[in-house]
Image: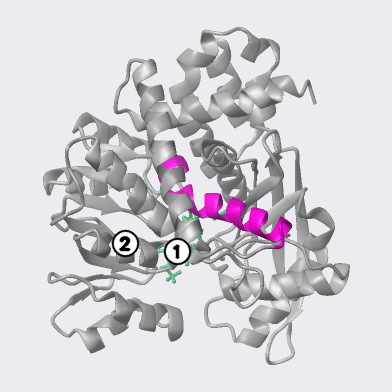
Amino acid sequence: MGYAKRAIEEVIFRTPGESEFHQSVIETLTPVIPFIESNKIYEELAIIERITEPDRQVKFRIAWRNDEGKIKVNRGWRVQFNNALGPYKGGLRFHPSVNISIIKFLGFEQIFKNALTGLPIGGGKGGSDFDPKDKSDFEIMSFCQSFMTELFRHIAPETDVPAGDIGVGKREIGFLYGQYKRIKNVHEGVLTGKGLDFDGLPGRKEATGYGLVYFTEEMLKSHGNSFEGKTVLISGAGNVAIYTAEKVIEHGAKVVTMSDSNGWIYDEVGIDLNIIKEIKDIKHERIYKYLEYKPKAKYFDSRFDWSVPCQIALPCATQNEIGLDDAKNLVKNGCIALAEGANMPTTLEAIEILKENKILFAPAKASNAGGVASSALEMSQNSSKTRWSFNDSNEKLKLIMKGIFEKISETSQEFGKSGDYVIGANICAFKRVSEAMISQGVY
Ligand code: NDP
Ligand code: 2IT
């Protein structure tokens, strides 16, 4: 067995029970094996062993008080994975399912995604098993303040810059920032995704969803196609899903599904996004409420199974939401392209089915990189003490997404696998990170 396969097996052996992390290591490194084997330097300098082991991981207790005065205890993590290219950068996820395996998979993906943006950002991720659902604003604030009372000692604008992810949006980032400022007595760009009422970047909120659509449009264009007139399935109804849907509709396509963790809606005539924004963004309600506004739409009280006919699928909820049977549904119903908005939403076996059936497939580390790319622009805005316009940041985002598509497309051609964006993205990102690690010596 060659070095790369042996080293991947060793990672799995040394991290028992971390199934999501194993999946992301296999998904990222398997396509790079022939490249790694073609150059002995990777083995000599133990690049796989080093790149799969976080620089450090912090786990901490978060005690906070709920509205009834009861003390609650949650767990928090920050994994600083790799800073070869810049300060650790990546979101915080607040969701009851969060554990070290999930944070490590997200942090590992983030290293390579951030490399693809071409910007100076390393990879990290954090979060907590805290569930923000059904909590009052006061409880969220109390939790965020307690979370930051530990996190502040590990982060700084040139060290580690967290942002949002599932369960962490503008409100949570605001409370976290307020506590950081209170403790350190400095106003500095230590978090991104901040509100526009203080230091946020116009366009950051929209960037992951818009970037996903800009990327997908480039991919479709290179195959002589576009969004115009297409039927699109989206999962999720959070930050990424909403702004993906907004841009898809602007591109002349129809979004017919969206979902949350309780169920999914199907509106044959096209989902009215203003209603979704009111339900999810303003009232923080469940998606079935859509039927109160649009009684002809359908609601299914079950997991979304991708069974509606479509040409384009954009998963924007969470990991492993498209399994083998879901992929078969997409193939059967005429899907021509799938681009990942969520992180690792497609299982390895589902990706195989999509590839076998010649469905264009865009891996998350390329297609959803718009969010973190805009975060890097927010860091730049903050350190230069200026204010960008929405137009400036959106135009820059378009260029970044086009650049990512071109880079990974060229890499796929260079390695004789034209149009295989999984190979293109992973080799391209691995090369950038490993070259920086090699230049910086063994550590
Ligand atoms: P939000 O919390 O805003 O929205 C998440 C959405 O996904 C909600 O509709 C939520 O439903 C649904 N969801 C979450 N967990 C599950 C689950 N286990 N099963 C079914 N549905 C679920 O998060 P974001 O939109 O920010 O994130 C969505 C995805 O995009 C994640 O994979 C994230 O890592 C990724 N991402 C986010 C970026 C960002 O900038 N925010 C950047 C790049 C990637 P409910 O409300 O019921 O929980
Ligand atoms: O997965 C991701 O890229 C994010 N959640 C955004 C990270 C960031 O630092 O903006």
Residue 363 falls in image quadrant: top left
Q: Please tell me the numbered disc located at residue 245.
A: none
The percent position of residue 108, horizontal first and vertical second, equals 59, 40
Q: Residue at x 41, y 49 (%)?
A: 398
Question: Is ligand 1 less than 8 Å from the beta carbon at label 1?
Answer: no
Region of the chain picked out in magenta, as a range: 365-385
Label 1 sits on what residue type?
Glu
| Quadrant (top left, top right, bottom left, bottom right) of the C terminus | top right
Residue 102 falls left or right of residue 245: right
**Cα distance between the residues tagged 1 and 2:** 9 Å
Query: Is label 1 in a helix, a strand or a loop?
Result: helix
Between 22 and 365, the residue placed more toward the observer is: 365
> What residue does disc 2 label?
247
Residue 386 falls left or right of residue 257: right
> What residue does disc 1 label?
206
Dot 1 alpha-carbon crowd within 10 angstroms: few under 14, some 14 to 19, many 20 or more? many
Label 2 sits on what residue type?
Lys
Q: Is residue 382 magenta?
A: yes
Dot 2 alpha-carbon crowd within 10 angstroms: few under 14, some 14 to 19, many 20 or more? some
Residue 32 falls left or right of residue 76: left
The percent position of residue 90, horizontal first and vertical second, equals 62, 51
Residue 308 falls in image quadrant: bottom left
Is residue 73 visible to the viewer in this orientation of the structure? Answer: no
Q: Residue at x 49, y 58 (%)?
A: 392
Q: Is residue 372 magenta?
A: yes
- Label pair 1/2, CB-CB below 8 angstroms: yes
Magenta part mainly helix, strand or loop? Answer: helix
The percent position of residue 211, horizontal first and vertical second, equals 41, 52
| Disc nearer the start of the sequence (1/2) | 1
Tell me the colour scheme of the image. one colour
